[in-house]
């Protein structure tokens, strides 16, 4: 029903602030105590779902979620979401990647200190009535080498804190610039193996992928210094469990601190008993009140954006745009989508072969992938069996044999920023261009059918081509008036000067109205002499 509020399920407790934010916009149900069976039975009612790590969004569950448009993961990873299945269904998957980085880094340091100074073991000993000072003598962190494999945001925060303890920090990550290492005063290793060879303490902060599964294996343990200690506060499965047990049994590894495990929750594990040099916690890396609340709120923001047509800046199945780029490009997203829709309308009736999106001027200096997606989304919207969105637009174009090309040009003649969308269809190229005008970057059309115009892009736009003779705006106005259609604005792009004597070129007219223009009205105008064609588009 029109005006009916969308429904969002919060399956796990993500903090009151996030839930309150969602309730401002949607009908929200809490399913903290729902079983998997109940979730499967009821998920079809919801347009959005918010989860943490316990809920598994499998392909089978996603198949039942017939109305689902957004999955929000209140945390860093999305290991528990079948992202491929969600993408095929056009469902946005977003996380909260910055929500718990400080908390995870602090827990890594807590585990590092506990491992170095035997704090948990000493606590248990003392509270059981023993005084064993010599038994739990530890080692200093000062001047020890901390090896970090995976030097993303959390790894960098750990490095900063470790340097505060006077540690030498050696890290490896092929996707971090050398300049960033220099800024942090961290040595850049040539490989993960080099880190293993030199580390007194080794902490892993890798994503979980097929390539990183069991990354710290028997071969890499063999490279380590005798008595080195290892930590995993990232993802279960990054360390080969059997190889770790063997390294501890042989004394090659002097201790381990583990916060994550191959499957969770877990209460039976080979290293839980009989290993006094192993410190374990039940996946507490993100477990602070501040991190939980922050993750829930950020996740709620992303779900709201996904369900209301906003920019999902942390989506994992569409390009994630940095804050600086998003600040510059955000105002141009509506323009990109409107141009795509208008260009496709002008090309309608022909076999569409290509969609070309060109970004010119100052916007070319930024990451324009999101703008390109908006162009494709606008071009296909309303023209496909499934609802098109920023997630599935490229797939739907590919399925239809439409080639999408994006390019950036540093200069835009006469404009600071310009977006030009060209549809190649039926052997013809139909192009429109627009820019944002004023401090709010209000979308304006500035080129259509090769003619210059300047008109604000409103929801209802009609475009005509006709022989360049006087009186045509009046003729269109008369027809619109007879049908009760009010014109908001009109602009004309004149035929070029210098045509051969006796030849009349084609002009282009753009008219915006306060209501959609029926096809019959367009056909009535085009049927009159001197008009070549006309199209009406709804851009809202």
Image (cartoon, rainbow, N blue to C red):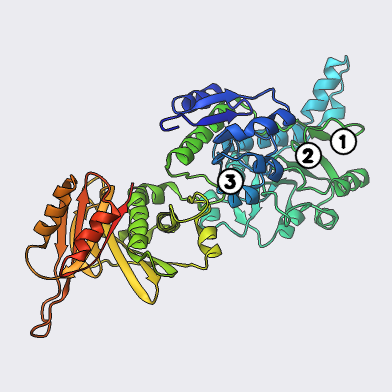
Residue in the image at 66% along x and 40% along y? 64
Identify the secondary structure beneath mark 2.
loop
Q: Residue at x 40, y 74 (%)?
A: 426
Q: Is residue 291 visible?
A: no
Mark 3–mark 2 distance (CA, rounded to whole Å): 23 Å
Q: Does residue 374 appear to the left or right of 484 in the view shown?
A: right
Q: x and y percent of residue 183 in the render?
A: 50, 52
Task: Tell me the residue that label 2 is attached to.
Answer: 261
| Mark 3 crowd level (few <14, some 14–19, many ≥20, 10 Å Cα) | many
The answer to whether residue 524 is above or below residue 56 is below
* Classed neighbour count for the residue bearing mark 1: other residues with Cα under 10 Å, few (<14), some (14–19), many (≥20): few
Element type at marker 1?
loop
The kind of secondary structure element at disc 3 is helix
The answer to whether mark 3 and mark 1 are in CB contact below 8 A is: no
The residue singled out by tag 1 in the image is 269
Residue 201 percent location from the top left of the image = 74, 45
Q: Split into 4 quadrants, where in the image is the N terminus?
A: top left
Q: Which residue is mark 3?
A: 156
x, y percent for residue 365: 37, 60
Q: Do the numbered discs 1 and 2 sit on residues whose CB atoms are within 8 Å?
A: yes
Q: Residue at x 76, y 36 (%)?
A: 116
Marked residue nearer the N-terminal end (1 or 2):
2
Left or right, 54 with reference to 383? right
């Amino acid at each position: 029903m029109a005006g009916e509020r969308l429904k969002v399920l919060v399956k796990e407790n993500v903090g009151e602030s996030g839930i309150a934010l969602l309730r401002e916009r949607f009908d929200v149900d809490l399913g903290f105590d729902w079983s998997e069976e109940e979730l499967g039975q009821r998920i079809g009612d919801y347009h959005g779902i918010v989860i943490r790590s316990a809920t598994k969004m499998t392909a089978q569950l996603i198949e039942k979620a017939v109305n689902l448009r957004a999955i929000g993961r209140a945390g860093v990873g999305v290991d528990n979401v079948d992202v491929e299945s969600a993408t095929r269904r056009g469902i946005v998957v977003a996380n909260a990647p910055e929500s718990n980085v400080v908390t995870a880094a602090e827990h890594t340091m807590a585990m590092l200190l506990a491992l170095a100074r035997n704090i948990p073991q000493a606590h248990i000993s003392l509270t059981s009535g023993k005084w064993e000072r010599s038994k739990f003598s530890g080692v200093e962190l000062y001047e020890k080498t901390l090896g970090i494999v995976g030097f993303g945001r959390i790894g960098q925060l750990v490095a900063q804190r470790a340097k505060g303890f006077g540690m030498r920090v050696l890290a490896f990550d092929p996707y971090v610039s050398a300049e960033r290492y220099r800024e942090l005063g961290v040595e850049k290793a040539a490989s993960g193996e080099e880190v293993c060879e030199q580390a007194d303490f080794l902490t892993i902060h890798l994503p979980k992928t097929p390539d990183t599964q069991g990354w710290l294996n028997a071969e890499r343990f063999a490279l380590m210094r005798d008595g080195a200690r290892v930590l995993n506060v990232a993802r279960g499965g990054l360390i080969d469990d059997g190889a770790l047990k063997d390294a501890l049994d042989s004394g090659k590894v002097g201790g381990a601190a583990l916060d994550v495990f191959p499957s969770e929750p877990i209460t039976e594990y080979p290293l839980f008993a009989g290993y006094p040099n192993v410190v374990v916690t039940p996946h507490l890396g993100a477990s602070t009140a501040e991190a939980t609340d922050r993750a829930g709120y950020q996740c709620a923001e992303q779900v709201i954006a996904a369900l209301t047509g906003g920019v999902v800046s942390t989506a994992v199945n569409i390009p994630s745009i940095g804050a600086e780029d998003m600040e510059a490009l955000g105002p141009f997203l509506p323009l990109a989508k409107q141009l795509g829709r208008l260009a496709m309308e002008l090309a309608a009736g022909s076999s569409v072969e290509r969609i070309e999106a060109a970004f010119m001027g100052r916007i070319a200096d930024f990451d324009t992938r999101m703008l390109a997606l908006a162009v494709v989304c606008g071009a296909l919207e309303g023209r496909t069996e499934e609802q098109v969105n920023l997630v599935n637009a490229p797939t739907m174009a590919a399925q239809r044999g439409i080639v999408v090309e994006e390019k950036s040009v540093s200069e835009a003649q006469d404009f600071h920023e310009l977006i030009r969308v060209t549809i190649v269809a039926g052997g013809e190229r139909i192009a429109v261009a627009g820019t944002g005008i004023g401090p709010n970057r209000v979308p304006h059309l500035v080129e259509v059918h090769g003619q210059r115009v300047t008109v604000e892009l409103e929801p209802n736009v009609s475009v005509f081509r006709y022989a360049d003779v006087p009186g045509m705006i009046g003729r269109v106005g008369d027809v619109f008036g007879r049908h009760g259609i009010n014109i908001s604005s009109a602009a004309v792009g004149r035929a070029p000067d210098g045509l051969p004597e006796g030849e009349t070129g084609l002009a282009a007219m753009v008219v915006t109205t306060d209501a959609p223009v029926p096809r019959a009205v367009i056909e009535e105008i085009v049927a009159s002499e001197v008009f070549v064609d006309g199209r009406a588009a709804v851009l809202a």
